Amino acid sequence: MQEKDTTQTDPDGSVPVAALTQSGIPVVVLQPTDAGYLVLTPCGNTAEITNGAPIDRAQVVVDPGHGGEWDTGAVGPNGLVERDLNLKLSRAVLEELADRGIPAATTRTFDYGVSLSVRAAFADAHEADVLISIHHNAPTWVRGDGPGSEVFVQSATPLQARADSARLGGLLYEEITTALAAFDDVAWSRLPDAGVLRVLQPDGTDTYGILRRPSTPSALIEYGYLSNHSEAELFATTEYIRVAAQATVDAIDAYLHTDRLGTGIIHEPRSFDPQSSSTPCDDPSLEWN
Ligand SMILES: [Zn+2]
């Protein structure tokens, strides 16, 4: 059914920073048009939408890593797919943020691709205080005596954002590793330098685009190893989603409302120069036809 009132501005007459399209896709609003908004699509194209609902400015932006046919992320030995797991955990994080009255928004609502530059632009458009990107790891793993969570933080950003990113990362690392360690029947895996890390490419900038691109203080969390059978079994449980979401929001809450610094900071950066490859991206339909 077509809505009659296609309000294009907030009640105070300003243009919203983002909008939820008729098909439920969050998009950055570039400018109002006669019929609606000109928006940035998930794949970084521009399009006009006519039935967008304004999204209020968010203090926290949650980014479910990967998505869509071309970017599944890791796949566990139990068949659990990272793009789906990240989305499920992100939804639980958003619910917990809402319960605590912290205004939040997400870069991805369903299973479709979103370019890294659009994820970053979405957080920056909100002038958010926090961007967290949710992931589960899958390189070669080695047995560890506790959760091998890794939190990647920003280096190549203005100084204050870098300090903020490190504190955000420290709090996420502290809360998440403490909460996950309570699952004591898991055969964890971890790399020797697991902690709060900066990962740099040869030119000294952040390797990961989701950290390099936004000016919003950001952190990328690898909660654990989906490639490890024991951890993959845990990640498939609703109890894991509940505990991990709660710990994540405890950290965000502490970041926003206390001066705590967190733990786990590794001062020596890891260097990693990925082969640059562009992942195809298919835009979802923004409106019902
Ligand atoms: Zn990932």
Image: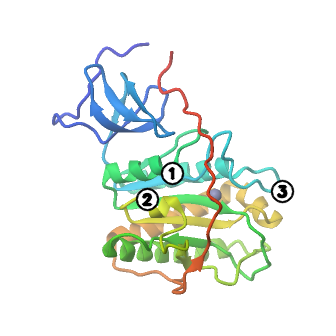
Q: Do the residues labelled 1 and 3 touch (CB within 8 Å)?
A: no
- N-terminal-most mark, 1 or 3: 3
Query: Which quadrant of the structure image shows residue 144?
Result: bottom right
Tell me the kind of residue under disc 1: Leu
Q: Can residue 161 be seen in this view?
A: yes
Quarter for ligand 1?
bottom right
Q: How far apart are marks 1 and 3 (CA)?
A: 27 Å
- N-terminal-most mark, 2 or 1: 1
- In this rendering, which labeled residue sits more in front, label 2 or label 3? 2
Query: Which quadrant of the structure image shows residue 10?
Result: top left
Label ID, residue 77: 3
Q: In this view, does 117 lie above or below 46?
A: below
For numbered disc 1, what is the local secondary structure? helix
Instruction: Tally the numbered discs.
Output: 3
Q: Residue at position x 55%, y 74% from top? A: 202
- Classed neighbour count for the residue bearing mark 2: other residues with Cα under 10 Å, few (<14), some (14–19), many (≥20): many
Q: Residue at position x 34%, y 61% from top? A: 129
- N-terminal-most mark, 2 or 3: 3
The residue lying toward the viewer, choosing from 149 and 211, is 211
Give the residue at mark 1: 116
Q: In this view, does 210 lie to the left or right of 12?
A: right
The residue lying toward the viewer, choosing from 228 and 206, is 206
Give the residue at mark 2: 213
For numbered disc 2, what is the local secondary structure? loop
Q: Is residue 109 above or below residue 244?
A: above
